């Protein structure tokens, strides 16, 4: 039997497991999934948690293990330390080395807090449950300016050009905060600023969405400092290059993305911490190593939707290789909804970032509802939805 | 004119009358009862209190509640008595007998603006630990001490407070490592965590040489162990060996696996702490934690917790004095044991510690507002919520979110209080705290300051250093001589 290991169990890993269970017969493969958490934290919902709803954090922990066990897969709760592609083994922190015939790496990007002088998770964030929850608690006491900061994306910069680690959730938090503070009649006393290295808001979305976002930010008096370079972060201030100090009573950070330590330690990265793959998400050098989601160099922007697309492409590629068939390559497009508060949302379906021409946009209540419905169904089906993107 | 009473008025009248009668009976009965009781008590008081209630008075005079409860525990279990939450025999609350000397007109430094609480742990290491405040989460092991939920909460708290948390003596918990921004692996003599991978995942390793509440004894646990832990040890009981681990081998081994991070040791605060320090200087130690007599653990043997070691404050003073005397400035000194809040932390830093590790106050903070849920229905103490040895239904009630919120509040207020102390002392950084800023409020505490302020003259320092080197040389020569002799004897025997 072909021995498959999936590292990581969020958007990328869970979708990989789904396609493995769909495409392969049980007698064809054995599947082991490794993650450091038994519960998946569903990150797209965290923006709402951070914007004043701390108690909702626990609603977005999705138990995955039973789902895997029902599919006949094995789950190991441990930390993967290193992949040895030569020996085809994964070194785990506390389990014996795990052999594989094929490995899917979906362990995401490590937050690179230390890439900015003084910055740390204690400054506030939204990317993990505890950060979003604490941000929400802190907001109840905030009386001064709020700054939503976005760190840079460190990568080779080609062929797709992006500057921010991920600016869409930052904008989403800013909009939701604006709505929440207005509802509580505190908005007039609390200025909100978004600091991003990107040139435009929503840099990964198409020009139409960017125009709507710019307009909406202006209308709601959310200051945008684009193309910013953060030099240093203190307890209550941010120093931008050159010599501009922004005061902040509360900060909410999307940290810089600096690739993955696991990829680096395993010698599988491209020199920037990302795993370089071909258009089937297969490692450029090791054909039995697939990279799915944020950790993949070509996953740009670092969105859950891209992770799910790549999981489908990668598992189909393995299936095709094992059954002597041809597979579909990864054709990226951005499918995203930003909650903008007050029951509205901005829907984007675009491939402009990759040189395409598609740029469909819708701004209104149905877009917000669509995102709410998707999130609810993802949670209900533990990521294995009847219709997978 | 005759008054006619209706039925309803009659009922009201009867009720009022019966209430009055009952009230009078209670009052009279109570008065009579009290009088009888006092007469009885008066009589008892005049008799020999050997077999009556007054024995309790004499007992409580000579016995503390602690001793009574421990005695009852021994009679119930037939085993050595244990208790959590640190030593209860701390007759001298040393730190409370010290106060800070506020700045006034002389000296009158400028009001500090940006007060920094930042500390660097193990500055000589290539990757030292930089903490936002000089307070660490003390080592408390998963499974052998705390539940997974409590450990996870503390890891989140540490990340949000900008400090480090420690694995403690328990096995590796992937969630803890994932949440903690800075994670210290405590190298214990338990049957786990010795894999190279675990060492490489650490931001610092601390070799456990014992702790104030337990000495260097072995620890065995066989009840209520988490399933994950049982699976790891492939058995029903866990034994953490006692004694000193092979230090020369350990230092080389750890440095080889993860050369860039600080390596520390956790020492029991003993009365021969200087000798221990001298021995430790043979190896590349970056951090020394002194765990005082007041230190707590989940279930410490009462005979050790209450009757061994020296107080944390004395250990800090003596360790710092020894390090200064030997011109050793690269070693970070961490104090732990019995520390309760910002004032204690600041005083210990003034007396020579670089940072302080705390456990009990954090356990109180994470349990805050979580006990009322089940208190009326159970007799369990607050620690039951976070300690590992309980039935699983209790663990489910622990709300990690709420726990993290309260413990982060604790850290925020402690940082605020530390800044307030520094401001009142006219200082802009925590490292500027020194013994000169302290006042002894009692005669008892005066020696603390006398010793910590003691300037060591140059010649004395040199002489002390020379004596130490001589002693070490002598020890080596004797050892070699012994080896040679045994070899000779063996040859002649053959
Ligand atoms: C606040 C926020 C909001 C977002 N909103 C949206 C949105 O609305 N729509 C959208 O499409 N995308 C959104 N994203 C992006 C999306 O969440 C990510 O792109 C997606 O999570 C990537 O999935 P992944 O599986 O590649 O990696 P991750 O989500 O990072 O998951 C990696 C998994 O691997 C595990 N892991 C990591 N290292 C190891 C190791 N060494 N050993 C074992 N396990 C390990 C982790 O525990 C984790 O479970 C958002 C992101 C954030 C931060």
Image (cartoon, coloured by chain):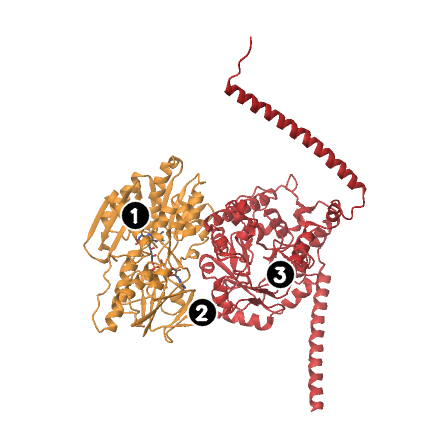
Chain colours: A orange, B red
Measured Cα–Cα span from mark 3 to mark 1: 52 Å
Residue at position x 32%, y 55% in the image = A163
Q: Report which residue position mark 1 lands on.
A: A372
Identity of the residue furthest to the bottom in this view: B494
B296 shown above or below B230: above
Point out residue A53 in the picture as x, y percentages from the top left corner.
39, 44
Q: Left or right? Give the position of B310 relative to B331.
A: right
| Disc 2 target residue | A95
Q: Nearer the viewer, residue B149 or B350?
A: B149
Please state the chain letter of the residue tagged with numbered disc 3 in the rendered image: B
User: Vertical placement of A192 versus B313: above or below?
Assistant: above
Looking at the picture, how far across and down is residue B119, in whole percent? 54, 54
- Binning the other alpha carbons within 10 Å of mark 1 as few (below 14), some (14 to 19) or many (20 upward) gives some
Residue B255 relative to residue A20: left or right: right
Circle 2/circle 1 CB separation < 8 Å: no
The answer to which image quadrant residue A344 occupies is top left
Position of the C terminus of chain A, as image quadrant, is bottom left
Same chain, marks 2 and 3?
no
In this orientation, which residue lies closer to the viewer: A75 or B178? A75
Query: Against B280, is B95 above or below?
Result: above
Quadrant containing ligand 1 reads bottom left
Is label 3 or label 1 in front? 1
Q: Which residue is mark 3?
A: B211
Quarter-of-image position of residue B475: bottom right
């Amino acid at each position: 039997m072909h021995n498959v290991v999936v590292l990581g169990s969020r958007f990328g890993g869970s979708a990989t497991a789904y396609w493995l269970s769909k495409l392969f017969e049980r007698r064809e493969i054995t599947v082991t999934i490794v993650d450091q958490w038994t519960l998946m934290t569903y990150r797209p919902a965290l923006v709402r948690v951070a914007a004043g709803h701390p108690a909702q954090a626990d609603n977005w922990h999705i138990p995955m293990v039973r789902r895997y066990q029902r599919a006949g897969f094995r789950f190991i709760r441990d930390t993967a330390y290193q992949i040895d592609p030569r020996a085809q083994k994964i070194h785990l922190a506390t389990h014996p080395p795990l052999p594989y015939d094929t490995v899917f790496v979906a362990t995401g990007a490590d937050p690179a807090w230390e890439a900015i002088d003084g910055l740390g998770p204690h400054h506030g964030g939204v990317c993990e449950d505890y950060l979003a929850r604490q941000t929400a608690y802190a907001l109840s006491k905030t009386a001064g300016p709020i700054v939503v900061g976005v760190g840079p994306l460190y990568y080779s910069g080609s062929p797709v050009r992006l500057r921010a680690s991920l600016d869409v959730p930052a904008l989403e938090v800013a909009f939701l905060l604006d709505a929440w503070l207005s509802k509580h009649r505190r908005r007039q006393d609390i200025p909100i600023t978004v600091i991003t290295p990107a040139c435009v808001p929503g840099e990964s979305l198409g020009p139409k969405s960017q125009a709507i976002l710019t307009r909406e930010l202006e209308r709601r008096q959310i200051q945008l400092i684009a193309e910013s370079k953060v030099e240093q972060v203190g307890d209550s201030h941010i120093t931008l290059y050159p010599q501009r100090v922004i005061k902040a009573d509360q900060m909410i950070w999307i940290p810089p993305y600096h690739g993955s330590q696991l990829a680096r330690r395993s010698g599988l990265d491209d020199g920037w911490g990302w795993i370089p793959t071909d258009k089937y998400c297969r490692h450029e050098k090791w054909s039995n190593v697939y990279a799915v989601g944020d950790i993949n160099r070509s996953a740009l922007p670092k969105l859950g939707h891209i992770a799910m697309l790549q999981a489908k492409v990668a598992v189909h590629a393995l299936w095709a290789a094992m059954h002597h068939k041809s597979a579909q390559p990864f054709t990226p497009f951005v499918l995203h909804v930003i909650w903008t508060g007050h029951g509205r949302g901005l829907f984007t379906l675009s491939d402009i970032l990759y040189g395409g021409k598609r740029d469909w946009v819708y701004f209104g209540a149905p877009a917000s509802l669509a995102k709410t419905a998707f999130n609810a169904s993802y949670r209900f089906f533990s990521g294995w939805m009847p219709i997978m993107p | 004119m005759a008054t006619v009473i209706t039925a309803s008025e009659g009922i009201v009248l009867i009720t009022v009358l019966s209430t009055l009668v009952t009230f009078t009976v209670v009052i009279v009965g109570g008065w009579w009862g009290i009088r009888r009781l006092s007469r009885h008590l008066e009589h008892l008081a005049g008799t020999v209190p050997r077999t009556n209630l007054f024995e309790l008075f004499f007992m409580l005079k000579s016995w503390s509640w602690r001793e009574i409860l421990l005695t009852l525990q021994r009679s119930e279990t037939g085993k050595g008595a244990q208790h959590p939450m640190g030593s209860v025999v701390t007759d001298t609350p040393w730190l409370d007998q010290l106060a800070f000397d506020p700045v006034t007109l002389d000296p009158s430094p400028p009001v500090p603006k940006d007060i920094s609480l930042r500390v660097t742990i193990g500055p000589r290491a290539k990757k030292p630990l930089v903490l936002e405040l000089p307070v660490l989460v003390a080592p408390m092991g998963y499974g052998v001490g705390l539940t997974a939920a409590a450990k996870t909460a503390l890891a989140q708290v540490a990340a949000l407070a900008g400090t480090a948390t420690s694995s403690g003596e328990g096995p590796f918990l992937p969630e803890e490592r994932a949440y903690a921004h800075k994670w210290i692996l405590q190298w214990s003599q338990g049957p786990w965590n010795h894999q190279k991978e675990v060492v490489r995942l650490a931001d610092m390793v601390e070799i456990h040489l014992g702790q104030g509440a337990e000495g260097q004894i072995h620890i065995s646990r066989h009840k209520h162990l988490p399933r994950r832990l049982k699976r790891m040890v492939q058995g029903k009981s866990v034994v953490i060996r006692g004694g000193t681990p092979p230090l020369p081998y350990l230092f080389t081994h750890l440095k080889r696996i993860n050369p860039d991070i600080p390596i520390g040791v956790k020492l029991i605060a003993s009365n021969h702490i200087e000798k221990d320090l001298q021995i430790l200087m043979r190896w590349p130690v970056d951090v020394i934690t002194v765990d005082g007599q007041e230190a707590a653990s989940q279930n410490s043997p009462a005979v050790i917790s209450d009757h061994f070691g020296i107080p944390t404050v004395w250990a800090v003073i003596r360790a710092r004095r020894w390090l200064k005397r030997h011109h050793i400035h690269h070693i970070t000194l961490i104090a732990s044991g019995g520390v309760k809040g910002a004032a204690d932390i600041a005083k210990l830093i003034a007396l020579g510690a670089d940072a302080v590790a705390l456990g009990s106050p954090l356990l109180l903070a994470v349990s805050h507002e979580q006990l009322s849920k089940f208190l009326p229905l159970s007799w369990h103490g607050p620690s039951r919520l976070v300690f590992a040895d309980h039935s699983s239904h209790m663990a489910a009630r622990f709300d990690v979110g709420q726990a993290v919120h309260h413990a982060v509040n604790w850290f925020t207020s402690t940082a605020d209080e530390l800044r307030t102390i520094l401001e009142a002392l006219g200082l802009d950084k925590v490292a500027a705290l020194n013994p000169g800023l302290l006042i002894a409020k009692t005669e008892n505490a005066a020696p603390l300051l006398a010793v910590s302020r003691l300037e060591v003259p140059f010649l004395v320092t040199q002489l002390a250093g020379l004596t130490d080197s001589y002693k070490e040389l002598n020890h080596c020569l004797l050892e070699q001589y012994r080896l040679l002799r045994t070899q000779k004897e063996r040859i002649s025997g053959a």
